[in-house]
Image (spheres, rainbow, N blue to C red):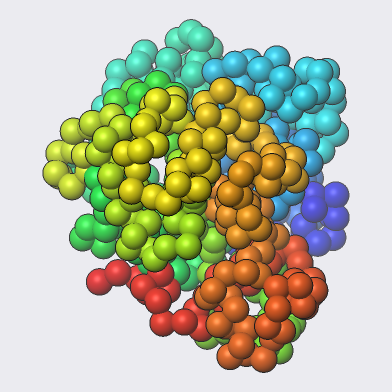
Amino acid sequence: MHTDTERCVRAVQSKDARFDGWFFTAVLTTRIYCRPSCPVVAPKARNMTFYPSAAACQQAGFRACKRCRPDTSPGSPEWNARADSVARAMRLIQDGVVDREGVQGLAARLGYSARQVERQLLAELGAGPLALARSQRAQTARLLIETTGLPMAEVAFAAGFSSIRTFNDTVREVFALAPGELRARAERGARVPVAPGVIALRLPYRAPLNPSNLFGHLAATAVPGVEEWRDGAYRRTLTLPHGHGIVALSPQPGHIDCRLSLTDPRDLTQAVSRCRRLLDLDADPVAVDGRLRSDPLLAPLVDAAPGRRVPRTVDAAEFAVRAVLGQQVSTAAARTHAARLVSAHGAPVEDPEGGLTHLFPTPEALSGLDPEALALPRSRRATLTTLVTALADGSLNLGEGTDWERARVALAALPGFGPWTVEVIAMRALGDPDAFLPTDLGIRRAAGQLGLPATPAALTACATRWRPWRAYAVQYLWTVDDHPINHLPT
C-alpha cells in the first residue's frame, strides 16, 4: 500500500487508525516517522514519504515519533493472510528465528539461499532480515526498559543485542533517547503496579474486535492445568525457546491487557508474538467483514457482532495433538483426554496464583507414550502416535514458516487424518485465513438454518464467494448455535 501515495496521504490526513501497521509515514523535514493515526497536525503532503515497515524507516535514517510510538503499531495483516516466502519469512522473524539462528537459519527454514531471502525482503519491505530483526530487538528493549526494573546490561542481552554499546547506539538512533531517558519517561507516567517479575503490556489491535467468540472459544476448550479463565482473563502456560512462561490476557477497550511471567526475559519477543498470533490481533476486520457482509446470508451475522477473530494457538504441534484428541468427541471429552496427557507427560511448573500446573507436553515428551494407556479407540491411538512420531523426528513441520499447502498434503497422508482434522489444523495452528470446515457439525447446522447447501461439496462451492476469508466465515456460522464457545465467560 505504501506505493499508493494519494491513498496514504488521505489516511494520514484523516488519522485513520485502520491503516496503522499497513504503512509508515516518514516526515522529510523532521526526520521522524509516524503511524497514520498520529495525533499531531498532519505534515504537508510534499514533506511525506511512505515506507512499508518501521525497519525501512529506521534504515533510511528516520527516528520513531514519541507521541504515536509507531514501533508499537499492530503488525501488517499481510503476513498472516499470505503464504508466500516473504510472508513466511516475516512470521519467522517475528518469532525470533534470526536472533536465534541467524539469516542462514532463516533461509534454511524457507528453503532458499540467504541472498534470495535478502533480495525478496528488500524488494517488498525496504529492509533485509537483519534490519527487520534489529527493529524488533529495539522494540523488545523498549518494552523491557519501560516495564521492568532489570539493569540495562540484562535488558540489552535479553533483547538480543550482542553488546551494551550496540544496545545503547540502537536505542538512541531509533528512539532519539538514551535507555536511561526512556526509563525515566516511563516512570513519570501513570503505571499500574504489578507483581515482581511480571511484565505488563498493552497489545494493540485494529478495531472492531469482538472478544466473545475469541475468549469464549479459548475458555470453553481450555485444558486443565495448562489453561484457565480467571478473574476476566485467559491464562495459560507457554513453552518458549529459553524456558517457560505464564501469560494472562484480558480484553479491554482499545487493547488487550497482557501480563507475562517469564523464566528468561530473552523470550519476551517470542511470547508477545505468540500471544498476538493466538488472538489474531494483526487481522484487518474491516476488510474481512466487508467481504463477508457482501453475502446477504452472512450479512446479518456480521452486523450483529462485527470484528470476530479466529482463535489460534501458541504452539502448532500442541494444537495438532489436541485436534486428534478431539476427533468425533465432545468438547468436554477432548478436554479430559488432553488433561490426562498433560498430567502424565507435561513438565510441571509453579504458578503463584495456583491455577496452572503443567506445560503441554512436547512431541519429544510424547514420543515414548504407551498407546495402551490411552483411553481412546485403537484407530485413534495409532493416529496420535503416528502424528507425535512425525512431529518429533521432523518429518512433519507445522512451524511459523510452514507452507500451508505442503503441510495439508503431509497431514492428509497420515492415517486417521480426514478433511475436518486437516482443515481445523490449517485454520487454528497454521493460521490460514481461508481454511474451511464444510464437514463440521456446527457448520452444517448453521447451513441448514440459513438456507445454505447441505452437502460438503455444495457448501464448499458456495463458500467460494467468501474467499480469502472463509476461516472468519466459520466463526460467524458457529454463532448460529448457542454454544459456550460463542460467549465471553462470566
- Count the numbered circles shown: 0
Image coordinates for residue 307, horizontal then vertical, percent: 55, 71
Q: Residue at 83% x, 31% y: name it.
A: 120
Q: Nearer the viewer, residue 435 or 206?
A: 435
Q: Is residue 402 left or right of residue 97?
A: right
Q: Is residue 263 left or right of residue 94?
A: left
Q: Nearer the viewer, residue 334 or 118?
A: 334
Q: Residue at 58% x, 49% y: name it.
A: 416
Q: Quadrant of residue 333?
A: bottom left
Image coordinates for residue 153, horizontal then vertical, percent: 36, 13
If the image is split into quadrants, where does the C terminus sit?
A: bottom left
Residue 476 appears in the rendering: no
Q: Quadrant of residue 231?
A: bottom left
Looking at the image, residue 304 lies above or below residue 156: below
Q: Residue at 54% x, 61% y: name it.
A: 310
Looking at the image, residue 25 lies above or below residue 158: below
Q: Is residue 306 left or right of residue 260?
A: right
Q: Nearer the viewer, residue 382 or 217?
A: 382
Q: Is residue 256 left or right of residue 117?
A: left
Image coordinates for residue 50, horizontal then vertical, percent: 77, 46
Q: Residue at 35% x, 38% y: name it.
A: 372
Q: Quadrant of residue 147?
A: top left
Residue 293 appears in the rendering: yes
Image coordinates for residue 239, horizontal then vertical, percent: 39, 32
